[in-house]
Image: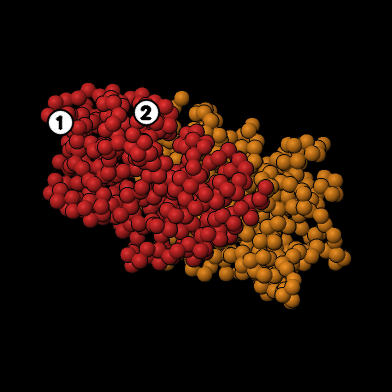
Chain colours: A red, B orange
């Protein structure tokens, strides 16, 4: 078994030092780790006048991924879910730390995991600045750091009555992919089945979209636990209600192959999509659509934010069908990968 | 079982909001989380002109603590080992994130764990700004944030030939306490046994000492894996050798009750002490001693840094006895709690 230090050195530290420089299209961005891996702390130099956005996520075998998951995909996803939190805040990624508990030092597994991790990190110019490895049941804890100008962050508490509610991409594919792996349903179309599994295993963090929405969107978050539950976080924090057209929620052609009930449950309550859900004033519709086109990410209006008129009312979602008729949905009990 | 959100809210988020303000003796320090727990990211406002020191540590049951450890002590230790990394860098703590995997939501355990955690956090004005909880084998991952002025950090690569080598406190108690719990040895003196176990379970991060050593010490680190191994990190990074008087390494009266061989192994190679090991020029001896007195932390000179004269020589430690005669020590194979 490799020792802790040679493990860190071989798969992470050396690679971190060799990482490609940040993307050329972010002119203001320079490597900012004054001191990286190998000391008691990493040192970073926050850019003057910016706030530092910080998020941490812990991924556990059996709860967030299967034991036999492709380690390259796991390396990708472990960082992707964290970058997605930065995206949802409108923050530009710049660094991360990695803490890793491993049952054994399997070199082939580590090589693939670190390849998946660094491939994504390098795409976003996000530098590995420190970490910890230990033996133990497989556990991956990443903390990411990003920059956002003061008062520009896309917060959950910023939705306003009259705002449109938007989502990026399509929803439900990741949960449908999980259902395929679990045998909850099957798809005859292999290409569509592969697409759904890929959505589960290789989510794409909407970093560029989040950055572009600064100053345009009001509230935002990323959909990790399912639209219904995550939108409620915005509503509770903003003390508002929502009217959502369930039929307007965008789904992929692959998801459309599932039975109607499963399809709707996946789209409205499936987790692990890591698309953005955001609100923006009605006057910003064209601006939002232009941003979607520019960033090559579909954006779809699915509803509106309504005021809470009576103190007795609580934040809630009123679901409607395409014709505007009320829908009574029971989405409780539809679990996703890391359901509570 | 409590859901994830009510767990976070009850034991961590509410308490984080209610935390006492930072210590009055750090005039420059104000709460700096522009946005704390409950959004996709926390937002902090780094103070102008300071560098941000970041460290992350993952603690795993069986590897870093026993399953039956007092959860109050575990909450203390999980943060203490991270604060110790800031101390070793000369950085002032200001915030941390907590990611927690729990096999079950045991309210009594969580209450005690969070009490131990926040008691230490409040002593150091260190604010919980975010985190993640999930079910899974018990795992605690904390990332801490501290401030340090540019070029003031106590780095591992800064030792200079002629420097004295110092350690704070006494060494070996934590490893001796582990040996008591493991039944490797016994102590008839109950008070001394309790002191050794306390050293293992409730290490005191040397934050004030680390801050005071800025501008005085050259290199520093905290002793988590044992003096012999940790001093080698300084020597490798500084490309230097060390001569250390093994008999000068300070030990407690409790440790002195152990047999000579165990005593020496604990002091020189025992882990989990979280004392500082640092180097400082000979001209700074009085300054270092005054700092130790002022901060009420014993500081002891144990050796000197020597140059590497020949390119064929490698960083190494030459151990001596009190009379200056060479000692041949075999410290390999003396494991500590989280040995590789």
Give the residue at x 26% y 26%: A260
* Residue at numbered disc 2: A186
Q: Which mark is residue A322?
A: 1
Q: Is residue B311 left or right of residue A163?
A: right
Asked if residue B149 shows in the view, the reply is yes
Same-subunit check for callouts 2 and 1: yes
User: Residue B164: x and y, percent?
Assistant: 71, 69
Residue at (78% x, 36% y) in the render: B183
Which picture quadrant has residue B315? bottom right
How many neighbours does mark 2 have within 10 angstroms: few (below 14), some (14-19), or many (20 or more)? some
Residue nearer the viewer, A1 or A37: A1
Tell me what residue is drawn at x 56 percent, y 55 percent.
A11
| Number of marks present in the image shown | 2
Q: Is residue B301 above or below residue A295?
A: below
Alpha carbon of mark 2 to alpha carbon of mark 1: how far? Answer: 28 Å
- Asked whether, in this view, residue A243 is left or right of residue A237, the answer is left
- From the image, state whether disc 2 or disc 1 is nearer to you: 2
Residue located 14% across and 51% down the image: A286
Q: Position of residue A231 (x, y in %)?
A: 28, 36
Q: Position of residue A277 (x, y in %)?
A: 27, 42
From the viewer's side, name the closer residue of B103 and A302: A302
Foreground residue among B67 and A296: A296
Look at the picture and state if A154 lies above or below A193. below
Q: Mark 2 lies on which chain?
A: A
Q: For the residue labelled by badge 2, is the local secondary structure a helix, a strand or a loop?
A: loop
Q: Can residue B303 be seen in this view?
A: no
Question: Subunit of mark 1?
Answer: A
Q: Identify the disc placed on residue B4.
A: none
- In the image, is residue A39 above or below residue A83? below
């Amino acid at each position: 078994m490799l020792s802790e230090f040679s493990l860190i050195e071989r798969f992470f530290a050396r690679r971190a030092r060799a990482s490609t420089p940040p993307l050329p299209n972010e002119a203001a961005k320079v490597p900012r780790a004054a001191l990286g891996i190998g000391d008691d702390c990493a040192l970073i130099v926050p850019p003057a006048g910016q706030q530092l956005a910080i998020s941490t996520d812990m991924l556990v075998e059996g709860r967030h991924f299967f034991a036999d998951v492709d380690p390259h995909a796991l390396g990708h996803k472990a960082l992707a879910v964290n970058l997605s939190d930065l995206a949802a805040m409108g923050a530009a990624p710049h660094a991360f730390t990695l803490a890793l508990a491993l049952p054994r030092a399997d070199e082939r597994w580590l090589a693939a995991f670190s390849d998946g991790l660094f491939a994504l990190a390098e795409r976003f110019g996000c530098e590995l600045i420190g970490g910890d490895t230990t033996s133990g049941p497989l556990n991956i804890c990443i903390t990411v750091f990003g920059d956002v100008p003061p008062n520009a962050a896309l917060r959950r508490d910023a939705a306003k009555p009259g705002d449109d509610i938007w989502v990026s991409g399509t929803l439900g594919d990741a949960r449908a992919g999980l259902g395929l792996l679990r045998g909850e349903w099957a798809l005859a179309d292999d290409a569509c089945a592969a697409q759904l599994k890929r959505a589960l295993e290789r989510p794409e963090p909407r970093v560029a979209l989040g950055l572009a929405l600064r100053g345009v969107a009001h509230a935002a978050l990323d959909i990790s636990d399912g639209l219904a539950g995550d939108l409620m976080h915005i509503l509770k924090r903003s003390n508002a209600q929502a009217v959502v057209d369930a039929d307007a929620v965008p789904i992929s052609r692959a998801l459309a192959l599932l039975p109607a009930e499963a399809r709707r449950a996946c789209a409205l309550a499936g987790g692990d999509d890591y698309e953005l859900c955001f609100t923006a004033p009605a006057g910003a519709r064209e601006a939002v659509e232009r941003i979607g086109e520019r960033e090559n990410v579909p954006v779809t209006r699915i509803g509106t934010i309504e005021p809470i008129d009576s103190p007795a009312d609580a934040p809630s979602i009123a679901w409607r069908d395409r014709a505007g008729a009320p829908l009574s949905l029971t989405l409780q009990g539809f679990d996703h990968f890391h359901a509570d």
